[in-house]
Image (spheres, rainbow, N blue to C red):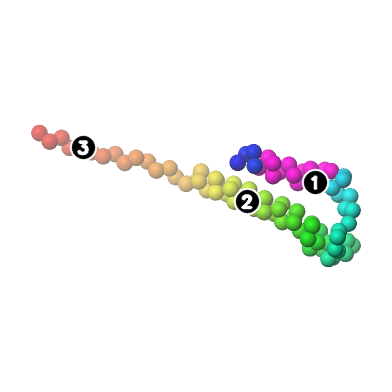
Amino acid sequence: MRMASRFALSLPLVALLCAVVQAHPGHAREVVPAESSWHYLLQPEHALVSGIGIAAIAGFGTVGYLQLARRRQPQLQPVRVRRFSSN
């Protein structure tokens, strides 16, 4: 799990820090003009990357929440049993 999280987190960091990725050379078919504020959400090429990022954040959030809920759950304690001796 840790290896997957390192790999999944490294891709968005490289995309944010790399100037070549942000150069934005153009699209084969422009659905929304680049001047629109919706361009990065509705253009299929950007929506794919945005969707992967949102899915990764949701997945890590779900795993973290489940681990936190498991830690908060009280642990079961063994019940003492009385043994009767038969004489």
Name the secondary structure under disc 1.
helix
Between disc 3 and disc 1, whose residue precedes?
A: 1
Instruction: Give the CA separation, mark 3 to mark 1.
Output: 66 Å
Which residues lie in the magenta part?
Answer: 5-18
Instruction: Give the CA separation, mark 3 to mark 2.
Output: 49 Å
Magenta stretch contains residue 6: yes
Name the secondary structure under disc 3.
loop
Prevalent SS, magenta region: helix
Q: Position of residue 45 (x, y in %)?
A: 79, 57
Find out whether the residues at labels 3 and 1 contact each other: C-beta distance under 8 Å: no
Name the secondary structure under disc 2.
helix
Identity of the amino acid at label 3? Arg
Between disc 3 and disc 2, whose residue precedes?
A: 2
Where 29 falls versus 77 (above or below)?
below
Instruction: Give the CA separation, mark 1 to mark 2.
Output: 20 Å
Q: How busy is the neighbourhood of tag 1: few (under 14 within 10 Å), some, or many (20 plus)?
A: few
- Between disc 3 and disc 2, the foreground one is 2
Quadrant location of the C terminus in the rendered image? top left
Which residue is label 1 attached to? 15
Q: Position of residue 14 (x, y in %)?
A: 79, 43
Which residue is label 3 attached to? 83
From the viewer's side, name the closer residue of 52 and 26. Answer: 26
Residue 41 appears in the picture as rendered: no
Identity of the amino acid at label 2? Gly
Could you tell me which residue is drawn at 80 percent across and 61 percent down?
43
Identity of the amino acid at label 1? Ala
